[in-house]
């Protein structure tokens, strides 16, 4: 069985124009474009989150790391 996150990353399922913080998608009105550096083609737009959102994301990631840092791939379901 392949890891669920690997499966999502293969498609465009994770390509959204919102931020992902603490396991939830958070909408943001401000966005900026992302370009393919080889072609200059615009690939899409991503959320331009502010300082408060960034601090929340760091706090959430730190809390998640404390839980998952000793987990094996068997626990992850990969």
Image (cartoon, rainbow, N blue to C red):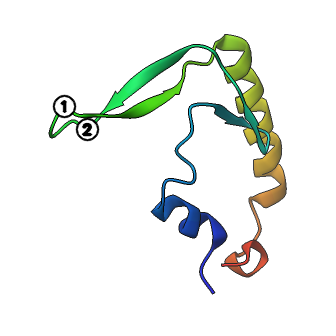
Contact (Cβ within 8 Å) of mark 1 with mark 2: yes
Q: Estimate the x, y position of residue 10 in percent, counting from the top left.
A: 47, 64
Q: Quadrant of the N terminus?
A: bottom right
In front: 28, or 50? 28
Residue at label 2?
Answer: 36
Q: Estimate the x, y position of residue 19 in percent, counting from the top left.
A: 65, 31
- Residue drawn 19% across and 31% down? 40
- Does 59 sit above or below residue 1? above
For mark 1, give the secondary structure.
loop
For mark 2, give the secondary structure.
loop
- Does 57 sit above or below residue 6? above
In front: 43, or 9? 43
Determine the image quadrant of residue 53. Answer: top right
Q: Residue furthest bottom?
A: 1
Mark 2 crowd level (few <14, some 14–19, many ≥20, 10 Å Cα): few
Mark 1 crowd level (few <14, some 14–19, many ≥20, 10 Å Cα): few
Q: Estimate the x, y position of residue 77 in percent, counting from the top left.
A: 73, 78
Q: Quadrant of the C terminus?
A: bottom right
In front: 8, or 56? 8
Left or right of residue 63, residue 37 in this image: left
Residue 64 is tagged as: none
Q: Estimate the x, y position of residue 13 in percent, counting from the top left.
A: 57, 54
In front: 51, or 6? 6
Q: Residue furthest left?
A: 39
Residue 40 is tagged as: 1
Estimate the spatial distance between the alpha carbons at disc 1 and disc 2, rounded to whole Å. Answer: 5 Å
Left or right of residue 8, residue 33 in this image: left
- Residue drawn 25% across and 38% down? 36
- Residue drawn 78% across and 45% down? 23
Determine the image quadrant of residue 69. Answer: bottom right
- Residue drawn 78% across and 59% down? 68
């Amino acid at each position: 069985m392949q890891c669920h996150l690997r499966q999502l990353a293969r498609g465009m399922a994770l390509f959204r124009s919102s931020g992902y913080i603490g396991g939830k998608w958070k909408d943001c009105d401000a966005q900026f474009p992302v370009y393919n550096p080889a072609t200059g083609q615009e690939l899409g737009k991503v959320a331009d989150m502010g300082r408060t959102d960034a601090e929340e994301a760091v706090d959430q990631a730190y809390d998640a790391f404390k839980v998952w840092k000793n987990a094996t791939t068997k626990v992850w379901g990969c």
